Each structure stands twice: as structure tokens, then as C-alpha cells.
Image: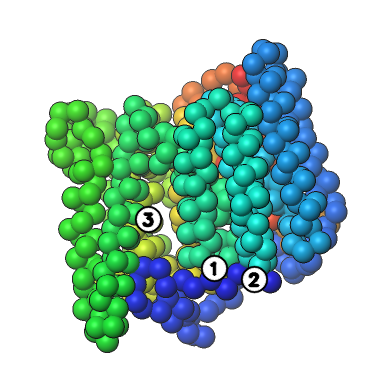
Amino acid sequence: MTCAAETKLYSGLNPKEKMTGSTSEKRDIEHVHDSPPSPYNGNMFAKIVQSIIIGMTIGVIHFKTTIKTEYILFTHCLAIVGVFQMFILRTYKHVCYKYEVIYAIYLPFILSFCFNRSLVTINTILSLNVIILYNISNGIYNLPIIFSTQILCCYFFDDHDLSYSIIAILVNFSLSIFLQRIGQLKSLDNIDCNLFSIMLTNVFYFNYNSTSVPFRILHGTLSALICVIIINYSISKLAKNWLNSHRYILSLTQSSVIICGFPMLTNYFIYIPEHKSPLEWLFNYITRSTIRQCIFIGWFTLVAILVPTFMVFQSKVTLNTSRKLWHFLVFLMITIPFKYDPEFVKIALAGIIPLFLCIEYIRYLKIEPIGSYLDSKLRSFADERDLKGPLIISYIYLILGIAFPLLVHNSPVGLISLGIGDSLASIVGKKMGRYHWPQSNKTIEGTIAFISSTFIVCKILQSSLNYFQNVSTLIIALMCLLSGVLEGNSILNDNILIPSFMLICEYLFTY
């Protein structure tokens, strides 16, 4: 049973009418390093491979857990996983859980354990929210039981104040339901909604007082965007009857709120110690460094030359190739500048994420005067997942997959895995792939291309730009091998899973 939630969230306009392209807009989609698709849900081989790889990383954590407090933390999380499994067993006859639901708890737990152990327990508890999402989408409303269980887990296992944890649970639940409704369980499935809601809860709530400039910018700009969305939604509801008959006026009103409200709210939410506006601070920040000026001019030049070029030649190459060219472009634009001024690149990424979300918001509602234009252009690069739902999120997945390792650990694994590995795997698999993984549409040739290309690029970056300074050649090879095999056997979105997993491997096998 699929959730049939209404998606009229932002305006009185009908999103379904606005988001569904005409038949002529729908084009054939080419899967990543694939040929004929095949049934995947019952692929026991892929599940075994993924379970072994996940088990290896959990085993490494257990082996490295020597301090008593860390062992207690690890044990608490295992207990929470036991509760997680209990609820799945309780409802499995009525709810069809995908195997990939394991990532809904694995990624929040292990990423927190690696990079912020004070949040391990609460993030693991929040991952229980995926059960609520599955149950709601299947007509099972047992929220009080699961909420009570989450609160009890916080009381017994988490060191934070109970009221602090309860607010986190409510914030995370609200965000996940919001994402579930706008994605209609098509653009975003339950696992995506759960992972993104936990990520946003960490940005908005857990890291609210972060001293990191990129995180402050990310928090402030996302907060401003959410306020703009709420204001536009309120306008559409308050004047629903009148504005629905004057849709162009509604679009102009919404665009005015974006143009005027977003900068003003950004000024409010981003705290600058010198009491300057964020734009003034950014201008001074760039101009007082020659390196930053060179990076900015280089970015501007590349975008000005290559973006129109890609648009012109888009019709002469396959959709798959044109999409991967953007991956290569992002790799070129970030890899070298990050080594010379990592803080500036992270600030740029922190600003680009909400900018892309704002673009998608304008396209989603086709807000005039550029909403329809954005919709037609972005749909020309849309893949199968984009076309089956109301959101076009591939480019947002890409920037998130690249930015996350850089923001969290100054690691280029997102750039390498998506800009090089995933791109070559897709192109090689599509052009040369003959041997498929069991019951999968992904090819072994594509996986080999991923492993070999990521390993070579990692070694080049290590020797020429001093990336991976504390990582041995053997560890790099193991990191690329495990990530490549996982990419070939998982159906979870590669742009989220593979950069996160490579980052986990880099940390676990090195530190």
C-alpha cells in the first residue's frame, strides 16, 4: 500500500499538474553500467555481499573499541538495534521492508561513531523513525508505541538531557514526514526520508551552536530557505480562493518573497562577529586573499565556458554520458582548490547546497518568471528516479555526496567516488559491460572500472596534492575494492551510500 499523501504543501497550485511532464518530455533513461534490468528485490547474493561488507566495518569498530566508555556506547547501540529488530518482526507480516532498511540504522550509527561519538546513541535512536515511515505508508499508525520506545531508549541509554532528546525526536519526525509528503515516496523513499531527516536534525538542532563557519553558513541559509517556504505556503493558504484564480499573481508574489525574504532572513540567521552582512563579509573574505580570488575567477571562468558548451553538445551524446560530464566538471572544480584553501571551498559548498534546494523549490512550483524554464532544462538531465516522482533530485544528491566528506573530514572520497569512479563505472559498463552481477542490472566490468579508476586517482592525489597523507597503499586499495563491490550490489542511491561508505573505510582503516 503506497502512501497517498497530498503534496499541496507550498502553494494553492496543484503540484501534480505542475510536476508531471508531457509525454514528449519523457525520454528513455540509461541505467548506470547496465543493460537489461532484472528483478532485484529477491537477490540473495547481493544481500549476502552487502551483509559481509557491513559486518566487516562493524567488526573493525568492535576490534578498535578498547576504552570502557566506548564499549558501553557500542553495547547500548546494539541494544537499540535489538529494539529496532523487534518492531520489524512485530509488523513484518503487514509491512514489506526492503533489505536496504539496514542502511537507515547503519549509516547514522557508524558515521556518528567515527566523527561525533556524543551523538551516536541519539542518532541511532532517531533511525528507529524509519519504522514509523514504513508503517504510515502501509496504513499502520502505532506512533505512540514507537515514540514511547524511543523516549525510553533515550532515558536508559543516552547521556543528553531527556527534554533535549525528546525535542530531537519530534524535530526528526516532523522533517521525515515533510520529506515523505513532498517526495510522494517516489522521488524519495522511506529510507531516503529517514537519512535526510537525521542529517537535517544534526544541522539544525545538534550543531546549532557550531563554531565552524561552513556549518554556520549551512545552518543559516537552510533556515532562511525553510522560512521562505513557510511564508509562501501561508500566503497561498490565507488567500487560497482568490489567488488560485490568479495564478500568475501568486507566482510573482512567491518570487518576491524569495528575492526579498531570502537575503534578509539569511542576514538574520547567519551571525557575523563584526556585525557585517554575510555578503559584505564574504566579499571581504575573498578579496583579502589572492588564492581565493584566483579560485573564484577560475570557477567563474569554468562555469561560463563549460556550462554553455555542455548545453550545446548535450543532444550529441547519450543522457548517461552528458550526466557524467557534470560529475567530471565538479571533480575538476574542487579537487585542486580544496588543497590550497579548504575553508573557502567548504564555505562555497555550504552555500551551494541551499542554493540548489532553492532552485528545486522554484522549479517544483514553477514559480514565474523562471520556474518553467528551470523545469524544462533540468528535466533534460533527469534520470528514471527523477521522472517517476515530483522532485528532480539527482543534482542535489550529487552535491551532497561530494560535500559531506569534505565538510565532515576534509576528505576527497566523495569527489573521487562520484566524479571519477561512478562516472567511469557507468560509461564503461554501458559501453563494454557483458557480465552482470547475479540478478542485477550492474556489470562486473563497471565495477572493475570503478575500483581501478578510484585507486589510480587516489594515488595520484596522494603523491601530487598530499591527500590521504596517513593512508597506506594497501588501505587505499581495500577502500576502493569494498566500495566498488558495494556499489555493484546495492540499489541504495550511489550518490549517498558510496561517498559515506568510502569515508567510513578511510577513517576505520586509518585511525
Residue 242 sits in quarter: bottom left
Residue to which mark 3 is pinned: 356
Residue to which mark 2 is pinned: 2
Q: Are marks 1 and 3 in contact (CB under 8 Å)?
A: no
Of the residues shown, which amino acid type is indicated by label 2? Thr
Crowding at label 1, few (<14), some or many (≥20) Cα neighbours within 10 Å?
Answer: many
Disc with the residue nearer the chain's start (1 vs 3):
1
Of the residues shown, which amino acid type is indicated by label 1? Gln
How far is mark 1 from mark 2, CA to CA? 9 Å
In terms of depth relative to the viewer, which is nearer, 430 or 172?
172
Tell me, for residue 430, which label it has, or none: none
Residue to which mark 1 is pinned: 184
Q: Position of residue 110 (x, y in %)?
A: 63, 33
In terms of depth relative to the viewer, which is nearer, 125 or 369?
125
Residue at the image position 28 percent from the left and 83 percent from the top: 241
Residue at the image position 54 percent from the left and 77 percent from the top: 27
